[in-house]
Image (cartoon, rainbow, N blue to C red):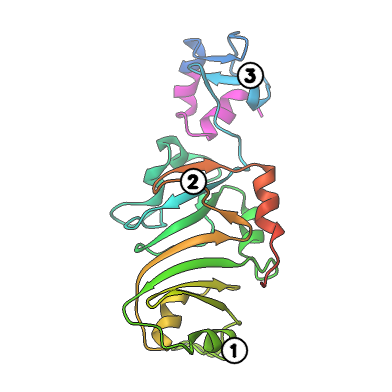
Amino acid sequence: MKLLRLIANLGYGSRKQVAAMFREGLITNVDSEVLYADDVVEASNVLVEGEPLDPPPGILLMLHKPVGHTCSHKDQGRLVYDLLPPRFHVRKPALSSVGRLDRETSGLLLMTDEGALLHRIISPKSKLPKVYRATLAENLRGDEAATFASGTLMLESETTPLLPAELEVLGPREARLTLHEGRYHQVRRMFAAVGNHVESLHRERVGGLELDDLEAGQWRLLGEADLARLFAVPSAA
């Protein structure tokens, strides 16, 4: 792909705007040599105004989603995309969240512009465990772990029971829950089904990936080693 099209697709501007950047000598290689619009160069060898070019299509990143942000391109209010560089909003192909966390849930959110990777991660065949930490409105009764692990729990308005899930009690009103599927508002609905209410919810892990030391609102690009970690963990403990 020629540089002009690549850089425009990465959201640096329209083709007309990017063409002007070439004319002004703002696009160079790592040796500070001016590049031209029809050059074909490895993306890793390109600088835009002295800064490395954003990664080409095929990226995967992790974001520490804060409470109050929505996983949507269209909703009103604060969006998870507002936490990324503005040009990421207009990359082609578009960057999408891998599944969703609701507005009031924080934690690990994966995002990619590669459709095949997105579907691989969310596919039931991958069976990637998702681990959540929940703070509850009422004390745990003591029978929740057995109920969640039974494989018979049915959520309201559904006709298929949930897959077995593992509950680890962390305190009277705090628990860690590992899921092996992803239904709508599943954690909140599971605790509602046993007479409790989730006051706060945080996703700690997807597959073998954790948030590491990312603060709320921070993100980082993931590499091949991270991708291997993601799929390395077995689907059940």
CA gap between label 1 and label 2 equals 34 Å
Q: Quick one: 47 or 74, which is closer to the camera?
A: 47
The residue depicted at 50 percent of the width and 27 percent of the height is 15
Q: Earlier in the sequence, mark 1 or mark 2?
A: 1
How many callouts does the rendering have?
3
Q: Residues within 10 Å of mark 2 (few under 14, many from 20)?
A: few
Residue 169 in magenta? no
In the rendered image, which residue does mark 1 sit on?
150
The residue depicted at 67 percent of the width and 72 percent of the height is 236
In the rendered image, which residue does mark 3 sit on?
38
In the rendered image, which residue does mark 2 sit on?
213
Front disc: 2 or 3 = 2
Quarter of the image where one finds residue 136: bottom left
Q: Position of residue 140 (x, y in %)?
A: 40, 83
Q: Earlier in the sequence, mark 1 or mark 3?
A: 3
Q: Earlier in the sequence, mark 2 or mark 3?
A: 3
Residue 10 in magenta? yes
Q: Position of residue 114 (x, y in %)?
A: 62, 49
What amino acid is at disc 2? Asp
* CB within 8 Å, label 1 to label 2: no
The residue depicted at 46 percent of the width and 45 percent of the height is 214
| Quadrant (top left, top right, bottom left, bottom right) of the C terminus | bottom right
Q: Is residue 89 left or right of residue 32?
A: left
Question: Where 172 sits versus 228, above or below?
Answer: below
